[in-house]
Image (spheres, rainbow, N blue to C red):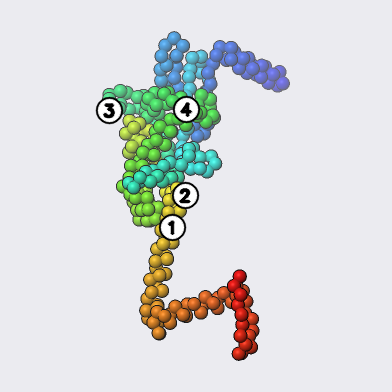
Amino acid sequence: MNRTLTALTAAGAAAVILGSATGCSTVNTAPDQVALHYSGGSFSSQQFKECVNPGTRNVNGPGEHYFYYPQGQRSFKFSDDPGSDTKPLTASTKDQQELVVRGTITFTLNTSCTAFTDSSGREWPGGMLQKFHDTIGRKYSAYATDGGDEPGEGWDRMLGVYIKDLADRSIDNEALKYGWEQLYNSAESKATWEKDVVAAIPDLIRRQAGEDFFAISSIVLQKPDISTALKEQLAAKQAAVLRGQAATVDQKTAESWPGGIAAYLAYQQQLAINKAITDGKVQILPVPQGVGINITPK
């Protein structure tokens, strides 16, 4: 029994060594990953062979190439929070003010491998995933080359072109229909703007990519933010409105006060004196009746 196990172990080791020596290739997709299998490339162009499903491990001969892509939902976050994919986006309003926009776009890469013929008449035996790889993925090196690995910088560059830039354009185009105060103060205007942006982004991405390579499942936009200067301007405006409202109330109260405006002013003066005494800002000295006092100004 032990001799048999030893022989099997030795045979397995020999197979691994032989495989390494002959340059065998291995595909090993993670549960949330798919791969495209191409052959050739040393002295001829690479040819598509098949799609590889998630959670697959196979050993093939030399000269085989595998390109790995993520399967399932991904998110693209534009914010100043740690871990964001990019900084907040900006939008220009019709009154030429710049707003800051934060949000998240949730999407799924179309990894369908169902063969189809596109509008130009070209056949894609590897479906949408093959066309994405050959027309976009290769250009940006947006794939991983080892199973289980995340795509590298090429994936980020690709998302910058097909997600970030197009979202930025849609946000900007819709913001030009509003003044900055409408988007900052009006819940109704903000809701309409967000609805129009959410409707515009997927269509713009599809037209730019040429196919439905990205399925957008949700777009969440936070309330547009304004610069510090605009916040100070808004606060000053609100303060002026409050002062005007207070003045109007005072005027109406004075006009209806018994004894007229003069009596109202005397009443307000007495209130001010009483408050100063209460706050300890005025010192009260008892003076006997009929005794004169001298006040020396400081």
Q: Which residue is mark 4?
A: 154
Label 3 near label 4: C-beta < 8 Å?
A: no
Q: Which label belongs to residue 228? A: 2
For the question of whether residue 54 can be seen, the reply is no
Residue 221 rendering spot, x and y as whole percentages: 42, 47
Which amino acid, by three-letter code, is at mark 4?
Gly
Which amino acid, by three-letter code, is at mark 1?
Ala
Image quadrant of residue 103?
A: top left
Residue toward you, 127 or 231: 231
Q: Secondary structure at mark 1?
A: helix
- Residue at the right extreme? 2
N-term mark: 4 or 2: 4
N-term mark: 2 or 3: 3
Quadrant of the drawing holding the C terminus: bottom right
Residue 231 rendering spot, x and y as whole percentages: 45, 52
Q: Secondary structure at mark 3?
A: loop
Q: Which residue is mark 1?
A: 236
Distance between mark 4 and mark 1 Cα atoms:
47 Å
Which amino acid, by three-letter code, is at mark 2?
Thr
Label 1 near label 3: C-beta < 8 Å?
A: no
Q: Secondary structure at mark 4?
A: helix
Distance between mark 1 and mark 2 Cα atoms:
12 Å
Which amino acid, by three-letter code, is at mark 3?
Ser
